[in-house]
Image (spheres, rainbow, N blue to C red):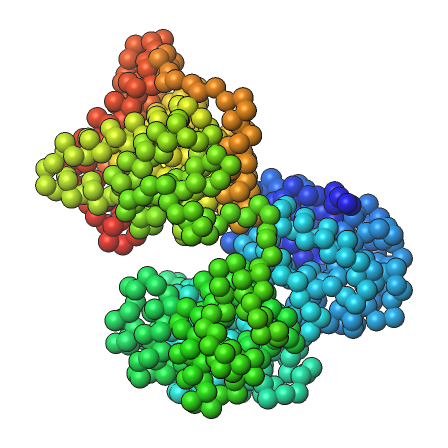
Amino acid sequence: MQTIQRVAVLGAGTMGARIAAHFANAGIPSLLLDLPSSGGDRNEIAKRGVENALKLRPAALFTESGAAMIETGNFDDDLQRIRECQWVIEAVTENLDIKRNLWSRIEKHRQPEAILSTNTSGIRLAEIARDFPSSFKTRFLGTHFFNPPRYLHLLEIIPGAETDKEVIEIVSMLAEKRLGKGIVICKDTPDFIGNRIGCFYTSAVERAMLEGDYTIEEADALTGPLIGIPNSATFRLMDIIGLDVWAQVARNVYAAKQDEWTDWFKPAPYTLKMLENGWLGEKTGQGFYKRVGPEKQIQILDWKTLEYHVPQKVRFESVEAVRKDPDLGHRVRALLESTDRAGTFLWCVLASVFVYSASMIPEISDRIVEIDRAMRWGFGHKLGPFELWESVGFEYVAKRLENERFLVPDSVTRMLASGITHFYRGAEYFDLIKGEYKPLEKRPGIVKLNDVKRARGEVDKNSDASLIDLGDGVLCLEFHSKMNAIGEGTVAMVMRGVELLERDFEGMVIANEGDNFSVGANLQIFLSAAQAGDFARIETYIRDFQQAMLAIKYAPKPVIAAPFSRALGGGCEVVLQSHRVQAFAELNIGLVELNVGLIPAAGGTKEMALRSADPMKGLDLIARAKVSGSAAEARQMGFLRPADRISMNPELQIGDAKQFALELRKNYQPGEPQREVAVSGGPGYERMVQAAESRKQAGEITEHDSLILEKAAYVLSGGRVAAGKTVSEQHLLDLEREVFVSLCGMPKSQERIQYMLQNGKPLRN
């Protein structure tokens, strides 16, 4: 099968530059071309694209050094260089004539076997490829990266009528494994799948808002995390995407379709006025939201008057009653059953989305699966429309739709009449076209813990963690406490896992499928015990946590940590002391204990002493409480080692970690705690204290920060021992524990812990 060693990205605007950046993240070099500049540097436009990618927030690149993998040029001088590339991606403006003209030029220079793709968000491939030779069409397809490409999992692949199947396979495999994408194969229809359903979702919210006389803040409050959608909700999302882009997506459908849904894609009068005024969202400084004054106060648009105002507090009794219910389906069902303004609004929105999604089969997709995946992977919804419908209750929704005379598709009516009550059943989905269940395809390498638990149950569990048999002799330790904070139950399950590992398994993976790997130790334990004067409990907890970390570090068989998202404090310490790490590329890891008035004490400070000959490096990581922006940056910071691995695709991470454990088992030799660790002693301690004092004098840290760093220096130096003296690993742990307990007794540390628990952010007292 053809390998992709280099790609060409044509178009260095925000999208093209971000695509090139993400190929750099995956270790694939690119040639980024755009129009020639009229100035002295003809490559200035493409270079500016790379510069902008470096400035973007959220960042487009894992590390700034990744920009070196992007070579720049221009269409006039360098287009012939696309012969060096095995994949050519066009990402110019959404204009059919511009795209066709550029492809005519590309056709003259491409290598015959090169894969050719357009990153269009809605223009039909058949229109772009019209009149091109068959040799072009067999290599041509659509690859719709969702923006920003680094963060959004979805890649829609749109084959043309003549696209070679091998081309689809090559792109799908590389995108899934190297770029970390979730692949959805789409038909060549307006806006494909994600934008088609996503744009309708927005139209449904807008229509319910206009007809029910709701404010923009009310609409966004009701269509965010409450119903499983990201914080950007509806109108904030349009500001992020750009109102002009979103309007073009709607126009694609409005211009191409004439059916009962067409008018849903017609822009509202206020939208036309905003476009006329250039109020396009973040890129123009104002849209539905804007920031005002030196303090950047947020104001929100009144769609009736087109004037901005300070956000009004939104409160609905029905919402307050269910907000804390962790079950999304149960929460939404309760809201839909309420008759207040919140329930009325959400029923108008979701009923329309459910009906529209079902009516789009088979037009945009033959299966419900692709529609659900597109909304989860491309828009960050917790559940796709069919998954949400089912979680709310298929019969409840279907019967209510019929009773209220919605245009329910025949496929749904037949389901209801046949007594079918689920869109998904185990490893099957319901085929709305055939009217029967079909098996979901197996996806090699993907391990879902919930699926494993349903099939095999759990080896052991408590309220904080579970042990799961992943098969092939690999055990998994799964965290499942609130935010995966590490409490006494987690520590106990670590020890139980190591016990079973020695007897019954060949390797262990520490992984979970929550929103975070772990936000650290359970702070409430320390605060409650300290306020009660029960420092013995704190010492016992820390000693047990330390011994659990030693147990995984020196386990009889390999232990692989699979961190992702946030691995903070104690979560970071788990990673540091696992034998190896299979990290997800989007890893935010760090020793952040300073923020709560403490030091790393489950082996984190000890590991800083062990991993670097210069204790200042370890002190700096503790002092800055810096968190990596990616796994690549975590490697630069020293949290990951050269032998640790990175998974680009979150769905493959646990499977990758499992294979890593089995690989290492072949030649694994357990170690034992070190007895002679070289430390910097008294001279190193003085140097570290002096550095902390300098930062305090410069106003970079507070008095209490300085005190904490002095205590961290005490541990890192081995307890201020004589120069040249060595200490044991256990001695460093004892020092950690001693310092940690003493800090828990300090009022300012307790204030920091309490503030973090109450506000979710650090206090600098």
- 255 on left or right of 571: right
Outermost residue to the bottom: 405
From this view, report whether residue 233 is shown above or below residue 742.
below
Nearest the eye: 665 or 189: 665
Nearest the eye: 10 or 176: 176
From this view, report whether residue 674 is shown above or below residue 425.
above
- 641 on left or right of 341: right
The number of discs equals: 0
Residue at 46% x, 77% y is: 419
Nearest the eye: 297 or 457: 457
Residue 428, visible in the rendered structure: yes
Outermost residue to the left: 532
Outermost residue to the front: 418
Q: Position of residue 498 (x, y in %)?
A: 36, 30
Q: Quadrant of the N terminus?
A: top right
Q: Position of residue 553 (x, y in %)?
A: 40, 26
Q: Position of residue 415 (x, y in %)?
A: 51, 78
Q: Which quadrant holds residue 729?
A: top left
Nearest the eye: 151 or 303: 151
Residue at 27% x, 40% y is: 489
Q: Position of residue 316 (x, y in %)?
A: 28, 76
Residue at 42% x, 77% y is: 395
From this view, report whether residue 647 is shown above or below residue 351.
above
Q: Which quadrant holds residue 715?
A: top left
Residue at 73% x, 50% y is: 170
Residue 706, visible in the rendered structure: no
Q: Quadrant of the C terminus?
A: top left
